[in-house]
Image (cartoon, rainbow, N blue to C red):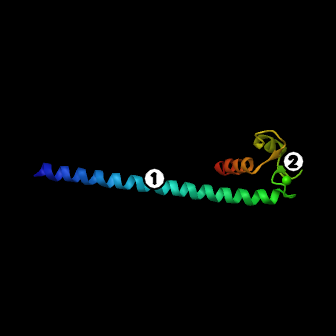
Amino acid sequence: MKKVVWTAAVAALALVCLAATPAAAQGKRAARQDMRARIEKRADKRFKKLDRNGDGVIDRSEWTRKAKKFDRFDRDHDGTLGPDEFRDFVRKRARHS
Ligand SMILES: [Ca+2]
């Protein structure tokens, strides 16, 4: 009898663990996606402000931070920051804050 109770308890615990893990993982994933969406929204908003002439890129004359940072995020070295490069900039900054 003890063995049956013990086996049932282990089985119940295993079921709880199996059920809880995907839910917890899903919750973390949803939270990460939510955070990413908020960061991207903030980046796009900031990008539009910095792109004063509205040509869809940020050039050096529009950049208000250190030139070194501009160079670091201008991945293709074309002298401008596109929306994707700028999003990476904001994402990396958010990660280090
Ligand atoms: Ca521009």
Q: Residue furthest left?
A: 1
Crowd class of label 2 (few under 14; some 14 to 19; many from 20; radius 10 Å): some
Q: Which numbered marker is on residue 70? A: none
In the image, taking residue 34 as reference, residue 40 lies left or right, namely right
Task: Estimate the spatial distance between the alpha carbons at disc 2 and disc 1, rounded to whole Å.
Answer: 42 Å
* Direction front: furthest residue: 55
Q: Quadrant of residue 49?
A: bottom right
- x 24%, y 51%: residue: 11
Viewer-proximal residue, 49 or 67?
49
Disc 2: which residue = 60
**Residue displayed at 61% across by 55% down:** 36
- Contact check, label 2 and label 1, Cβ < 8 Å: no
Residue at 12 percent across and 51 percent down: it is 2
Q: Is mark 1 within 8 Å of ligand 1?
A: no
- Judge left or right: residue 58 versus residue 87: right
Q: List x then y, in percent, for residue 62.
A: 86, 53
Q: Which mark is residue 25?
A: 1
Question: Quick check: 78 left or right of 1?
Answer: right
Helix, strand or loop status at disc 1? helix
Per the image, label 2 sits on a secondary structure element best described as loop
Amino acid under disc 1 = Ala
Figure disc tally: 2
Ligand 1 closer than 8 Å to label 2 CB: no
For disc 1, the neighbor class at 10 Å (few under 14, some 14 to 19, many from 20) is few
Q: Find residue 27 and report its horizontal and vertical position in percent.
A: 48, 57
Earlier sequence position, callout 2 versus callout 1 = 1
Location of residue 33 in the rendering, given as x and y in whole percent from the top left corner: 57, 55
Q: Amino acid at mark 2?
A: Arg
Residue 47 in the image: state x and y as whole percent.
77, 56
Q: Which residue is found at the position 81% from the left and 54% from the top?
A: 56
Q: Nearer the viewer, residue 54 or 30?
A: 54
